[in-house]
């Protein structure tokens, strides 16, 4: 009788031990799973910016300048719409808007389509410096490069009214040195001079100050 009771007790102990062991295994498996999800979504990981490229910046004090996000509200008479094929845009020129903003007379309203050989991911109208004159259309392409079209230089062309649609607002190609770009934001840059610019945001969280690239752009 005692041997049967002892055997029964040992079986209970063994079952309890196995249950504890299974519980420990599930605990650590679940902990690792949660940690993995947290690592991809937590604030620390979201703020990680990777190795610093010497040509990129972060909001706040960076490279001797203080970068702040800037909101812009203007009506320059130029609008850009992406088309359903995602490889072309429709540019619309409003005569009155252009005259009021740039003091340029283009004669009449116009609209034309521009086609690219890469898919367009985002369109942005940017301007740089301290006054009007360097506005351009910026386009993020599927490969993370940025193509641009100058606005003022096109509108000021003395042959504008006699040009065909195929001759107007053509891309100047990709801005050399920009890679992995996923978005844009307007910037107010406070340094020794101070100016407005566009930040080309990279997928690692840093951004390029496009004002630094303007000297090499056909604006």
Image (cartoon, rainbow, N blue to C red):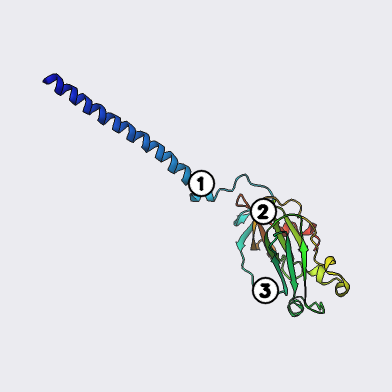
**Residue 156 appears in view:** yes
Label 1 SS: helix
Residue 21 vertical position relative to residue 131 in the rendered view, above or below: above
Label 2 SS: strand
Between the C-alphas of marks 2 and 3, the distance is 24 Å
Q: Which residue position holds label 1? A: 40
Q: Position of residue 203 (x, y in %)?
A: 62, 51
Q: Residue shown at 85%/72% (left/top)? A: 160
The answer to which quarter of the image holds residue 61 is bottom right
Q: Position of residue 52 (x, y in %)?
A: 64, 46
The quadrant of the picture occupied by the C terminus is bottom right
Q: Position of residue 165 (x, y in %)?
A: 83, 69
The residue furthest left is 1
Q: Which residue position holds label 3? A: 74
Q: Residue shown at 41%/37% (left/top)? A: 29
Nearer the viewer's eye, disc 1 or disc 3?
1
**Badge 2: how crowded within 10 Å, few (<14), some, or many (20+)?**
many
Earlier in the chain: of badge 2 and badge 1, it is: 1
Between the C-alphas of marks 2 and 1, the distance is 21 Å
Q: Position of residue 48 (x, y in %)?
A: 56, 48
As drawn, the label of residue 181 is: 2
**Residue 150 appears in view:** no
Left or right of 205 in this view: 156? right
Between the C-alphas of marks 1 and 3, the distance is 38 Å
Label 3 SS: loop
Say how many tags the image has: 3
The quadrant of the picture occupied by the N terminus is top left
């Amino acid at each position: 009788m005692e041997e049967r009771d002892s055997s029964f007790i040992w079986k209970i102990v063994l079952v309890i031990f196995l249950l504890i062991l299974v519980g420990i295994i599930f605990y650590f498996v679940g902990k690792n799973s949660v940690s993995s999800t947290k690592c991809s979504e937590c604030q620390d990981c979201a703020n990680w910016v990777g190795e610093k490229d010497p040509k990129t910046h972060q909001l706040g004090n960076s490279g001797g300048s203080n970068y702040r996000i800037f909101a812009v509200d203007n009506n320059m008479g130029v609008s850009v719409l992406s088309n359903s094929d995602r490889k072309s845009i429709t540019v619309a020129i409003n005569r009155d808007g252009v005259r009021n903003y740039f003091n340029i007379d283009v004669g009449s309203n116009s609209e034309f389509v521009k086609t690219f050989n890469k898919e367009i991911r985002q369109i942005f109208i940017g301007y740089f410096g301290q006054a009007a004159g360097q506005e351009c259309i910026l386009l993020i392409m599927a490969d993370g490069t940025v193509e641009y079209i100058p606005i003022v230089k096109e509108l000021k062309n003395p042959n504008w009214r006699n040009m065909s649609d195929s001759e107007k607002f053509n891309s100047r190609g990709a801005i050399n040195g920009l890679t992995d770009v996923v978005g844009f934001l307007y910037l107010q840059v406070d340094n020794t001079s101070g100016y407005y610019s566009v930040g080309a945001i990279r997928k690692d969280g840093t951004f390029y100050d496009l004002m630094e690239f303007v000297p090499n752009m056909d604006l």
